[in-house]
Image: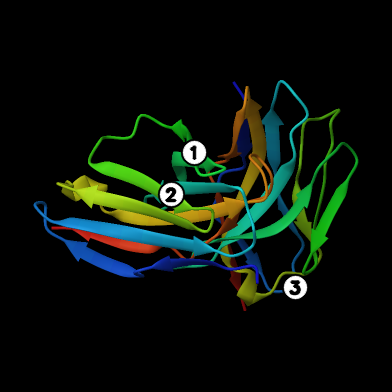
Amino acid sequence: GDSVTQMEGPVTLSEEAFLTINCTYTATGYPSLFWYVQYPGEGLQLLLKATKADDKGSNKGFEATYRKETTSFHLEKGSVQVSDSAVYFCALSYFSGNTGKLIFGQGTTLQVKP
Amino acid sequence: DTEVTQTPKHLVMGMTNKKSLKCEQHMGHRAMYWYKQKAKKPPELMFVYSYEKLSINESVPSRFSPECPNSSLLNLHLHALQPEDSALYLCASAPDLGSEAFFGQGTRLTVV
């Protein structure tokens, strides 16, 4: 079935370092792909999305490109801040018959130190 | 308005209690979801509603009972819960099934 695999964390970086969080997916169709962020004690916030191959989603300095050939959607940011410390979830849209849902990866915890 | 509002934010209930969680959105979204999230885990899908009809029930125990009174409201009725049901319960809505979902802040539920 459809699934999402994320790199294990936690990822610990110093402020202003470059961030990459890997995400690969398995899907039978052509899903949309998403990155969500969850700050401590809060719900999930949509960070960015891409709906078709070669689309680049971007928001707040974060970027991810939908790569069909490598079935990947890696999250990148050029210079992280302490305020970026959170859990990041990669997700894909799944459709079956007349219903659908989001399928999430396991999440990657990012810790940014001053 | 891009908000999904969940009430209450925190809930402590005994194993014999009956309580309800409420979720509201005014974005005109046609899909609404309930998720359960344990600490350091991804959200687990419980129920999906599409056009106010139950679309997916992920084999959730009957002590959880969803209700969608109208297109803006989603409730989750709780009865005879167990301590292992303690978790963060998240509601989300989306324009359509499988499109980007917008989450509420969640209800932190503790069963004692």
Q: Which of A7 and B70 is in front in this view?
A: B70
Q: Are marks 3 and 1 on the same chain?
A: no
Counting other residues with Cα less than 10 Å from the Cα at mark 1, is it few (<14), some (14-19), or many (20 or more)?
some
Counting other residues with Cα less than 10 Å from the Cα at mark 3, is it few (<14), some (14-19), or many (20 or more)?
some
Q: Which of B15 and B48 is in front in this view?
A: B48
Specify which label sits upstream in the sequence, 2 or 1: 1
* Residue drawn at (47%, 32%) of the image: B56
The residues bearing labels 3 and 1 have C-alpha atoms spaced at a distance of 47 Å
Q: Which amino acid does label 1 sit on?
A: Lys
* Residue drawn at (17%, 50%) of the image: B83
* Residue drawn at (63%, 55%) of the image: A36
Residue B66 is left or right of residue B12, and the answer is right
Indicate the chain on which mark 1 is placed. B
| Label 1 element class | strand
Q: Name the residue under label 2.
A: B68
The residues bearing labels 2 and 1 have C-alpha atoms spaced at a distance of 7 Å
Q: Mark 3 points at which residue?
A: A16
Q: Residue B53 carries which label?
A: 1
